[in-house]
Image (cartoon, rainbow, N blue to C red):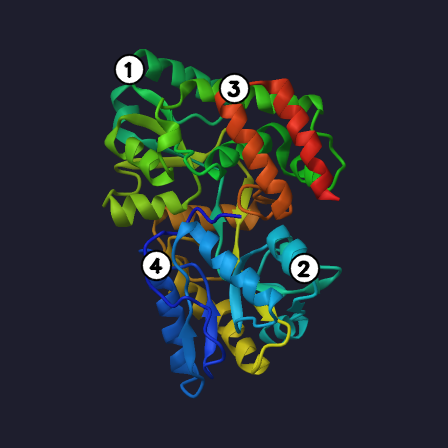
């Protein structure tokens, strides 16, 4: 699935070189912030292991789509990179582990003492059949509602924490001629992300998880209620949503043309790095309605592909990536928080500090929109169904589409 926190700027190698003798680190991190974070991580590795030559084999473009196409071609041709970026959850486990393309790395976790440094729910997301297959380098939170502080203050509004509060605030904003909710669904995952956050709010993490293992049906009354709520939210979005991407939608909030945006916390990186806005001055943040204490998690991870040369050197890189030092070199620049719960809090801004605190105690829910909750075939079908629903708002038809797609979950 697409990574929203990725850029379509161009740099890096094409990733299709044959063995150059270098340790090839394959990712789609080529944009501002993410590229800096990756370079900081590589620099740290080179300082620790100057005798191990390393290659930044990032593939730009299409929010990860290009990189994933190159990766799929190479993996199928038994020419894997030394290690590659992959989202924890179904994208890793149903994609590469199930296909027999990854080596377990339980020994690395044992050697580096990682088993108690990541939350158990997170380790479960990078494990299959009791074995661990990758190391998380970061955490992005998907269930964040961003809002323009000035717009809220001028209209004497509080950030909504429930759906009732959201609709009340949205009505007041609409009456003033302000777009309540910004959406840019030129790429369909953004609307899917709003939908998954409504599901999390209505179902809670435990019931939400049951959707992906078949224990909860998509025509369950709670799911239908979530869809009705999602439908109502769509009546408050900008008319030009289908011609905007997530950055464009974030810009509407930054300019005060829209008041709120539901987006992952790469939006914070965009606000701060690209638009030069200040945390808690220009924009504020709360968990999306009714998801307080829950955390829609998107985690970038790296593992050990089967058949790579110099597997011991790959494990050295994974050890650096999983260390406090590595995570604190990468994440402040990327705009994410560390996957480790013992990282140095002082290196992060107030949003980072708040999110790190939440992450320690929250119930984790894997993102559907970003390939962690369900296999790619299902996510593609859901994106199509959501896209149609945003336009047609046919609740019954949407439920039927979700039920039909669920055959992909088996």
Task: Pick whichever of labels 4 and 2 is earlier in the sequence.
Answer: 2
Determine the CA span between mark 3 and mark 4.
40 Å
Q: Contact (CB < 8 A) between labels 1 and 3?
A: no
Can residue 89 be spotted in the picture? Answer: no
Q: Which residue corresponds to the image point at 49% horizontal and 80% vertical from the top-left?
A: 19
**Which of label 3 and label 4 is nearer to you?**
3
Q: Secondary structure at mark 4?
A: helix
Q: Give percent across and percent down for residue 383.
A: 55, 36
Q: Residues within 10 Å of mark 3 (few under 14, many from 20)?
A: few
Q: What is the total number of numbered labels drawn onto the structure image?
A: 4
Height in image: 243 above or below 318?
above
| Residue ID for mark 3 | 392
| Residue ID for mark 4 | 333
Q: Residues within 10 Å of mark 4 (few under 14, many from 20)?
A: many
Q: Secondary structure at mark 1?
A: loop
Apparent side of residue 39 relative to residue 65 in the rendered image (left or right): left
| Residue ID for mark 1 | 177
| Residue ID for mark 2 | 127
Q: Give percent across and percent down for residue 109.
A: 62, 70
Determine the CA span between mark 2 and mark 3.
39 Å
Q: Which residue corresponds to the image point at 63% horizontal and 76% vertical from the top-left?
A: 307
Q: Give percent across and percent down for residue 228.
A: 57, 19
Q: Which residue corresponds to the image point at 50% horizontal and 37% vertical from the top-left?
A: 193
Task: Pick whichever of labels 3 and 4 is earlier in the sequence.
Answer: 4
Height in image: 10 above or below 180?
below
Q: Contact (CB < 8 A) between labels 3 and 4?
A: no
Q: Contact (CB < 8 A) between labels 2 and 3?
A: no
């Amino acid at each position: 699935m697409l990574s929203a926190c990725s850029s379509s700027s161009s740099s890096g190698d094409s990733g299709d070189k044959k063995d150059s003798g270098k340790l090839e680190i394959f990712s789609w991190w080529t944009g501002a912030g993410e590229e800096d974070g990756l370079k900081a991580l590589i620099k740290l590795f080179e300082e620790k292991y100057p005798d191990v030559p390393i290659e930044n084999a990032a593939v730009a473009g299409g929010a990860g789509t290009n990189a994933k196409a190159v990766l799929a071609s190479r993996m199928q041709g038994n020419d894997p990179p030394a290690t590659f970026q992959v989202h924890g959850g179904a994208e890793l486990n149903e994609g590469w582990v199930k296909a027999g393309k990854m080596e377990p790395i339980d020994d690395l976790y044992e050697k580096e003492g990682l088993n108690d440094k990541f939350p158990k729910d997170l380790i479960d997301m990078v494990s299959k059949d009791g074995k661990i297959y990758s190391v998380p380098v970061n955490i992005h939170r998907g269930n964040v509602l961003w809002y323009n502080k000035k717009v809220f203050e001028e209209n004497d509004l509080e950030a909504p924490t429930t759906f009732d509060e959201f609709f009340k605030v949205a009505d007041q904003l609409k009456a003033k001629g302000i777009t309540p909710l910004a959406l840019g669904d030129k790429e369909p995952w953004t609307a899917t992300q709003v939908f998954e956050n409504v599901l999390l709010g209505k179902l809670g993490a435990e019931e939400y998880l049951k959707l992906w293992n078949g224990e909860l049906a998509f025509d369950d009354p709670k799911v239908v209620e979530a869809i009705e709520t999602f439908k109502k939210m769509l009546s408050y979005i900008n008319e030009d949503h289908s011609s905007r991407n997530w950055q464009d939608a974030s810009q509407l909030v930054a300019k005060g043309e829209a008041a709120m945006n539901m987006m992952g916390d790469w939006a914070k990186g965009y606000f701060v790095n690209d638009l030069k806005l200040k945390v808690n001055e220009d924009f504020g943040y709360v968990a999306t309605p009714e998801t307080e204490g829950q955390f829609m998690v998107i985690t970038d991870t790296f593992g050990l592909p089967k058949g790579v040369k110099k597997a011991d050197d790959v494990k050295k890189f994974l050890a650096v990536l999983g260390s406090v030092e590595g995570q604190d070199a990468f994440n402040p620049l990327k705009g994410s928080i560390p996957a480790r719960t013992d990282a140095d809090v002082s290196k992060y801004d107030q949003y980072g500090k708040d999110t790190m605190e939440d992450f320690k105690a929250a119930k984790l829910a894997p993102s559907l929109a970003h390939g962690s909750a369900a296999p790619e075939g299902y996510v593609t079908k859901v994106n199509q169904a959501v896209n149609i629903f945003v336009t047609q708002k046919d609740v019954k038809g949407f439920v039927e589409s979700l039920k039909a797609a669920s055959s992909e979950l088996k």
